[in-house]
Amino acid sequence: MKCSRKRIEVAGYSLDICIHECVYEPAEDTMLIANALNILSRIGNRFGTIVDLGSGTGILSLIALKIFNPHKIISIDINPYAVYITKKNLEDTGNALVLRCNGLKCIRGKVDLVISNPPYLPTYDKSHDECSRWLYASWGPDTLLHVLCMDIQKFSNRAIILYSTLSSIDMEECLRRRGYKTSIIASERFFMEELRVVYAWR
């Protein structure tokens, strides 16, 4: 499998990463959650073990490694192309584990922080197209948010999650019902929707 190289400027870092047409390329939402990670660091947060759920290119894993210097980061995606590209981008880090998995099912025990920038665009039925099938139908936007909300308490007391106000799930309310405190630490409006990064802790 071949990939192209692209230089990305994000959260104060210049990263030369591997990208692929079947993997969501870093965009404004990536920058938003990366900046939120910087905010967490500036207010004194440190995390030893981190999970990047829905890793895509693995760019948030790279940023988390630079910002927090954890002793382990686990990058998870169900898209086989994303798993390959994440491995390529993290191969020189030495303390990253990349897994192909549906949600958090492959995690045992608890981690210090879960990061997730899940799909939030509409899911289209393009199963005849290999790339589109993985880009749009691996996890429906609300499906992954639902899984996160239902399962997060089993795996971590802290999470940072990006979601859209167009989602049918009120992510903050869902997390609060499970005993988390929440705070929106970054947001940006795009036409009819607002992207929000919620930090949850307990």
Image (spheres, grey):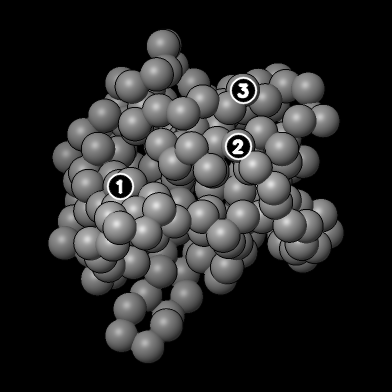
Q: Which residue reaches farthest front?
A: 128
Position of 8 compared to 100: left or right? right
- Whether residue 29 is visible: yes
Discs 3, 2 touching: Cβ within 8 Å? no
Q: Nearer the viewer, residue 188 or 122?
A: 122
The x and y percentages for residue 199 are: 44, 48
Tag shown at residue 139: 1
Q: Nearer the viewer, residue 89 or 35?
A: 89
Position of 59 compared to 22: left or right? right
Mark 1, Cα crowd under 10 Å, few <14 / some 14-19 / many 20+, is: many
Task: Find residue 16 and report its image quarter.
Answer: bottom right
Q: Quickly name the residue at label 2.
A: 84
Q: First in sequence, mark 3 or 1: give its number.
A: 3
Tag shown at residue 97: 3
Task: Find residue 34 and report its image quarter.
Answer: bottom right
Discs 3, 1 touching: Cβ within 8 Å? no
Position of 80 compared to 152: left or right? right
Dot 3 falls on a residue whose secondary structure is strand
Task: Find residue 5 and report its image quarter.
Answer: bottom right
Residue drawn 72% across and 41% down? Answer: 89
- How far is disc 2 from disc 1 in space, using C-alphas? 18 Å
The x and y percentages for residue 178 are: 21, 34
The residue under label 3 is which amino acid type? Leu
- Whether residue 184 is visible: no
Residue drawn 34% across and 54% down? Answer: 133
Residue 186 drawn above or below residue 88: below
The residue under label 2 is which amino acid type? Tyr
Position of 21 compared to 130: left or right? right
Dot 1 falls on a residue whose secondary structure is loop
Q: First in sequence, mark 2 or 1: give its number.
A: 2
